[in-house]
């Protein structure tokens, strides 16, 4: 059997998931809406290796001690076919891993697509989504292009608007490349147990989902900005009121937020979102991208500013 390689891009949630109903199946406690981006990517190459005793995961050229977070995904996928020989999965991210740039989503999505092809599993879309959820609750969204809705009703996933239907720009302001101290998985567990805002956060989510769906379907930029920023602030409130508090934002993150407020004040149509990490993702119309980048460059300690577009879903790629 020849090697198979797949690629997937990170996705950034506009209406976020933070909390699980069930930590064994890794089911999110709420629906979420995201944008899949381009430029940043994860690749996964799968091949057999008869010298191995068990499956091996190599992440960014480093052999992992165990399959870790991807083990439930691999076990689920392999349950569709009796496979005796161990395989090696080589994952590469072309951007910082575990730093709030959704590397687990793109990483898991690329692995799901590569393994489905490698073992000729021919899984349905729903089965691919189920496989991805087991590795990371946000990973199914990276299987799809453009604006994506992951619905908690039946854990199905679909594109609301495709990549070219509303070609907004995303400006990623990288304020640190350090790995986060508390993983999303552990952070969600802590928040559910300790934040007094957790219940309200979960209960309010459907309202935000409905507003965002309306905004995306009608391409109402202001409404999407309003509900996305509000949802992001609520998630960070839940994080920061957890015990111990989960502080993912750093000083530079706050300087970015201040600069965004100033730009809005002078009439530039932009909004931001921030995940479990200190990076700020600004969403704007293409006509404003250059001005936004030049303003953000003035902030001290910004490590990198990357302009990206909406991107494609996970897919197979040929070996170069
Ligand atoms: O899928 P996970 O376990 O990496 O968690 C993702 C959590 C957030 O990025 C903060 C929100 C989201 O919906 O992507």
Image (tube, rainbow, N blue to C red):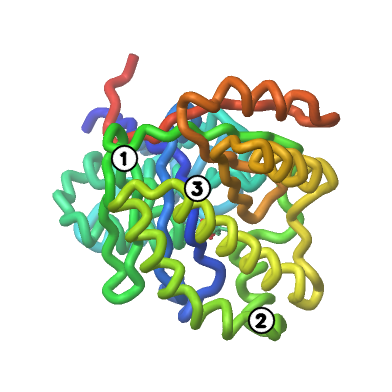
In this view, the residue farthest toward the front is: 266
270 or 89, nearer to the observer: 270
> How far is disc 1 from disc 2 in space, using C-alphas?
34 Å
Question: Can residue 238 be seen here?
Answer: yes
- Disc assigned to residue 197: 2
Residue 90: image location, x then y, percent: 46, 35
Mark closer to the chain start, 3 or 1: 3
> How far is disc 3 from disc 1 in space, using C-alphas?
13 Å
Residue depicted at 33% across the width and 31% down the height: 5
In this view, the residue farthest toward the top is: 320
User: Helix or strand or loop: what does disc 2 sit on?
Assistant: loop
Which one is closest to the eye, mark 1 or mark 2? 2
Crowd tier of the residue under label 3, counting other residues whose Cα lies within 10 Å: few below 14, some 14–19, many 20 or above: many
> How far is disc 2 from disc 3 in space, using C-alphas?
23 Å
Mark closer to the chain start, 2 or 3: 3
271 or 75, nearer to the observer: 271
Ligand 1 closer than 8 Å to label 3 CB: yes
């Amino acid at each position: 059997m020849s090697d198979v390689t797949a690629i997937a891009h990170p996705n950034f949630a506009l209406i976020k998931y933070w909390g699980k109903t069930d930590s064994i199946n890794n089911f999110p406690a709420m629906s979420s809406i995201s944008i899949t981006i381009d430029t940043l990517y994860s690749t996964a190459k799968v091949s057999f290796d008869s010298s191995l005793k068990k499956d091996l995961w190599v992440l960014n050229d480093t052999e992992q001690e165990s399959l870790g977070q991807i083990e439930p995904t691999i076990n689920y996928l392999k349950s569709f076919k009796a496979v005796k020989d161990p395989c090696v999965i080589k994952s590469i991210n072309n951007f910082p891993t575990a730093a709030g740039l959704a590397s687990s989503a793109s990483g898991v999505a690329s692995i799901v697509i590569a393994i489905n092809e490698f073992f000729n599993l021919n899984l349905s879309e729903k089965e691919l989504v189920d496989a991805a959820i087991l590795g990371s609750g946000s990973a199914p969204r990276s299987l799809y292009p453009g604006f994506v809705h992951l619905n908690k009703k039946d854990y199905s996933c679909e594109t609301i608007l495709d990549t070219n239907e509303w070609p907004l720009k995303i400006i990623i302001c990288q304020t640190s490349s350090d790995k986060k101290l508390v993983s999303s998985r552990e952070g969600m567990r802590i928040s559910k147990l300790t934040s007094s805002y957790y219940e309200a956060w979960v209960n309010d989510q459907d309202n935000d989902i409905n507003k965002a769906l309306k905004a995306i379907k009608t391409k109402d930029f202001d409404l999407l900005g309003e509900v996305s920023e509000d949802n992001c602030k609520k998630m960070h409130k839940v994080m920061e009121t957890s015990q111990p508090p989960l502080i993912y934002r750093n000083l530079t993150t706050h300087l970015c937020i201040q600069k965004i407020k100033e730009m809005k004040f002078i009439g530039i149509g932009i909004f931001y979102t921030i995940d479990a990490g200190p990076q700020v993702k600004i969403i704007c119309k293409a006509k404003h991208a250059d001005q936004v980048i030049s303003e953000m460059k003035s902030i001290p300690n910004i490590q990198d500013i990357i302009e990206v577009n909406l991107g494609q879903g996970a897919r197979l790629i040929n070996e170069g």
